[in-house]
Image: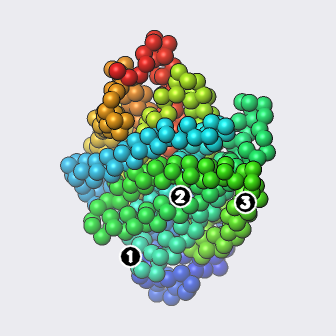
Amino acid sequence: MFVPESQDELLSPSGSVGRGTSQQYGSNPSPSQNCGSPQPFSSNGNILLANTSLHYEPQETDFLLPNQLYGRSRISGSTRAKDAGGSGAPAESVCSMVLQILVPFVLAGLGTVSAGMLLEVVQNWDVFQEITEIFILVPAVLGMKGNLEMTLASRLSTAVNAGKMEPAREKWLLIVGNLALKQLQATVLGLLASLMATLLGWMAESKMPYNHVMLLCSTSVSTAFVASLLQGIIMVGVIIGSKRLGINPDNVATPMAASFGDLITLALLACFSHWFYSLIDLYPYVLYLVDLLFLCLVPLWVVISSKHPASHILLRTGWEPIITAMVISSIGGLILDKTVSNPNLSGIIVYAPVINGIGGNLVSIQSSRISTNLHLNYPPGEVPEDRRGCFSPCRTFFGSGANHRSAQVLLLLVLPGQLIFLHAIHLMKGGQTLPSPLLTVAFLSASLIQVFSLLCAADCMVHCLWRRGKDPDSYSIPYLTALGDLLGTALLSLAFVMLWCIGDSGSV
């Protein structure tokens, strides 16, 4: 919630938030606008007047929040939430919700299946065999879609539902600012992911040649930057298209971000690593120039993203969740690296992107829906009455609200969805071998436990973040998708170890 440091900051263009039709950034509001507009609230519910002489500590600002709703939510917000059934988004039937979720869910699943098949092929390339630390990069780089693309999709979905993308000028300022911010974050995360992979590889092997370090850095930064740019442009198109078709973007945007995200990112990772590996001995300076080029673009992204208040504030507050999520995903990558290095467990490679991708897709839908509901009905710091006590998993799935129904739908999609994707893997392998019954049961059990845990974590985390005055759109999805990568990889590795111990080959 925005709390001004002074009277000038309250009245300044950068500190004002409106629907965009009555007030544009860069022009001061007229007295009549100030008199007719709702007054902002402090975290304790007191109205902040423009002529106050008190000093207030600055807090996190989210310029995507519907300020007009917040202006009256302390007085009528609770009543409005109850009257609206706890949702400010357009009402939707269960059938409509299932149809909107099902299509992008299937597309996302097929994308992760394709990514798994691609990873199974490229694991035999020389660069993957000699520099095995690339496997540590895989969950971290693939997880960036949760850190960046899905977070962008969630923020823009909330902006659409809150009416913040109606004026054309405001819409494009918001989009360009967020895309520039995403390129900056992708560059930094790509570099940090490579350093994390280097550190974990060195801790595991007690050695790390310098040319391998440079290849990891160049590959990670190049993959993150190009994949982020391509997916960001496509993501904006999906959001705008959903708005024009009357579809709730919360249901389709985040899984659509994942449907092409894994495959594009993994293909770029394989191509860049193979290319740099061919240059590492003859033209090693190319690797240095690539890193230098992307780092030189950092000031440009900072300048562009600072033009809009929404992306400007995230330059300071948006780093904690994505960096923490990258570290969590890298730990999952270390587990994957150690599992793949065992020839008896190498079959896990084709299933890892599927279980991780599907878990992240489903929990991102739920997180985005809960976040939009809170944005539209409650001021920061205030949560629904049934979420003020101790957390209980039963409250996630049982109730009459729209988010309870969506949690039930998402959990019910796991088993039939994963069966479809297992069959798709079988067909893409040529239809010559089938997964064994024990492998099927183990895979489905691991996926069900993963998604159940993630949906419960999303319900608890989103409300806790909102209670602390933090925007769940920017914080929750990176944590949840990274947790999904770690849980999915760990549970799947455990399943394959158990199958190996009882002598099951995993296929029939």
| Circle on res. 286 | 3
Residue drawn at x 70%, y 36% as measured from the top left: 200
Q: Nearer the viewer, mark 2 or mark 3?
A: 3
Q: Quadrant of residue 36?
A: bottom left
| Circle on res. 166 | 1
Q: Does residue 122 appear left or right of residue 426 in this picture?
A: right
Residue 460 coordinates in the image, percent (x, y) = 47, 40
Q: Residues within 10 Å of mark 3 (few under 14, many from 20)?
A: some
Which residue type carries mark 1? Glu
Q: Earlier in the sequence, mark 2 or mark 3?
A: 2
Q: Earlier in the sequence, mark 1 or mark 2?
A: 1
**Mark 1 near mark 2, Cβ–Cβ under 8 Å?**
no
Residue 109 coordinates in the image, percent (x, y) = 37, 44
Q: Quadrant of residue 38?
A: bottom left
Residue drawn at x 54%, y 67% as measured from the top left: 179
Q: Nearer the viewer, residue 254 or 351?
A: 351
Q: CA distance from mark 1 to mark 2?
A: 28 Å
Q: Residues within 10 Å of mark 2 (few under 14, many from 20)?
A: many
Q: Which residue is mark 2?
A: 227
